[in-house]
Amino acid sequence: MTLQPVGQLTPQPWMRAEETRAVVAALTAEGAEVRFVGGCVRDAVLKRSIKDVDIATHDPPERVMALLRKAGIQAIPTGIEHGTVTAVVGPCHFEITTLRCDVETFGRKARVQFTDSWAADAARRDFTINALFADPEGRIYDPFDGLADLGAGRIRFVGDPVQRIREDVLRLLRFFRFFAYYGTPPPDVDALAACRAMAPYLPRLSGERVSGEIIRLLMAPDPASVLLLMQGERVLPHVLPEAAEFGRLRLLSWLEGRGLRLDSVKPDPIRRLAALLRTDAEGAAAVASRLRLSNAQTDRLVALCAPAVLPDAAMDDRAVRRALRRLGADRFRDLVLIAWAGRKAVEARPHPGETEAWQRLLEMADAWRPVELPVRGRDVLDLGVPRGPEVGRVLGEVERWWEDGDYRASRAETLEKLNSIVRDGRGERPA
Ligand code: ATP
Ligand code: MG
């Protein structure tokens, strides 16, 4: 490993932050050497916003715990046998990992050995761009030419790709995820060949690990092209055989990103997943269960894959309001976006006025306030209708009238209508 720094990070707000300085001061109080590692260094080099700060140290985890506590910093033994401790300062979490080399790896569980070699620790990391280190002064250490790869958009495994994937199959999915965020085509040939060869081992991964990667991949600026690459390499069918609507996903991501600039429309992984799948309610439920989605996410995915109402640009205002009332604004908006993307995927040129028509649906969703039928079953009973199916029939009829009137009728007006429906039902003439 190059022991010499190869560059210097520009001053980073996260490095200068009080919280970071407190953790670094605690860890180095008795002379230990620490370096920032992984995503924070990689993203700092690219001037992208960083997600979390990972720190590597020579000290074993017990000592890390003691040093943090001595400095009054909360220390959580997150994965003490793997050498990981989490330091919590106010809202900030820092993952502190003891330098280690993996002696044996079986999936995520590796038998680890702590080491005092930065080179050994770098060698167990997955990609060259993830094996960058920076010391507290911002000097960059780059043992595997990760900086050059980062500049060129090359996602390259540290070491032999087949062997690295055999040690932990998740790295296969991580390859595509990092390619989606940091890669420039064409992808590394050796890595791709290894992914293709090792793909049949993917089903060994737990649903949670697969899900974590798929969701993060879906949140990339343009996930469709990478998912299509995974399809072409026969990787995707091992984790998501239902994926088929790549064009629709591409256009949905575009709409959510640069295409529309609406505050209410942000990239959303479940909506993107629904746009990608070609399946029915049962199939969507099966995907959700495989990916261990929450109940709320499952309901949403199923509702989007098997919609109760299919919005289209030709809907009139009344039909839109009916759909909004039935689905709620959020689900209606999801379906509009998916339907619009699907339409764009098959018809490159919109009809005159079509874009405005789709946009109008989204604006109506933004402006929608939930409404409730101003009468209830109790009101029907009060008019002398006996308990039973007739109550529901009468309510249904008044609701249709209320919908036809665009939900504008007041309670008094609706009661009056109810009254006339009940009288008509009895064959009475209105007074
Ligand atoms: P993110 O921005 O998603 O947090 P990251 O690079 O920080 O990206 P983490 O999952 O937080 O990713 O992992 C931190 C570092 O640990 C990585 O940069 C990489 O060096 C190493 N790492 C994580 N998972 C693996 C793995 N499965 N195999 C090898 N190294 C890994
Ligand atoms: Mg990280």
Image (cartoon, rainbow, N blue to C red):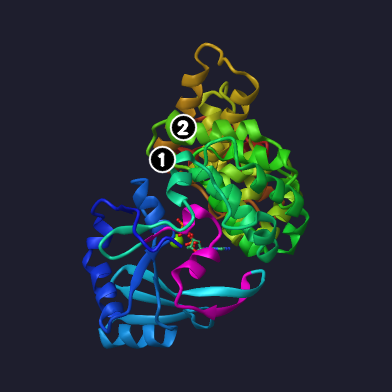
Q: Secondary structure at mark 1?
A: loop
Q: Position of residue 363 (x, y in %)?
A: 42, 31
**Which label's residue is closer to the chain start, 1 or 2?**
1
Q: Is mark 2 within 8 Å of ligand 1?
A: no
**Start-end of magenta stretch:** 108-133
Residue 332, visible in the rendered structure: yes
Q: Are marks 1 and 2 in contact (CB under 8 Å)?
A: yes
Q: Position of residue 395 (x, y in %)?
A: 60, 45
Disc 2 designates what residue? 362
Foreground residue among 395 and 58? 58
Residue 409, visible in the rendered structure: no
109 in magenta: yes
Q: Could you tell me how many numbered marks the image carries?
A: 2
Amino acid on which the number 2 mark rests in the picture? Leu
Foreground residue among 326 and 91? 91
Foreground residue among 236 and 259? 236
In the picture, measured across the screen, residue 276 lies left or right of residue 200, that is: left
Q: Position of residue 154 (x, y in %)?
A: 53, 43
**Mark 2 closeness class: few <14, some 14–19, many ≥20 residues within 10 Å:** many
Disc 1 designates what residue? 264
Give me the residue at 36% from left, 69% from top: 93
As drawn, the label of residue 346 is: none
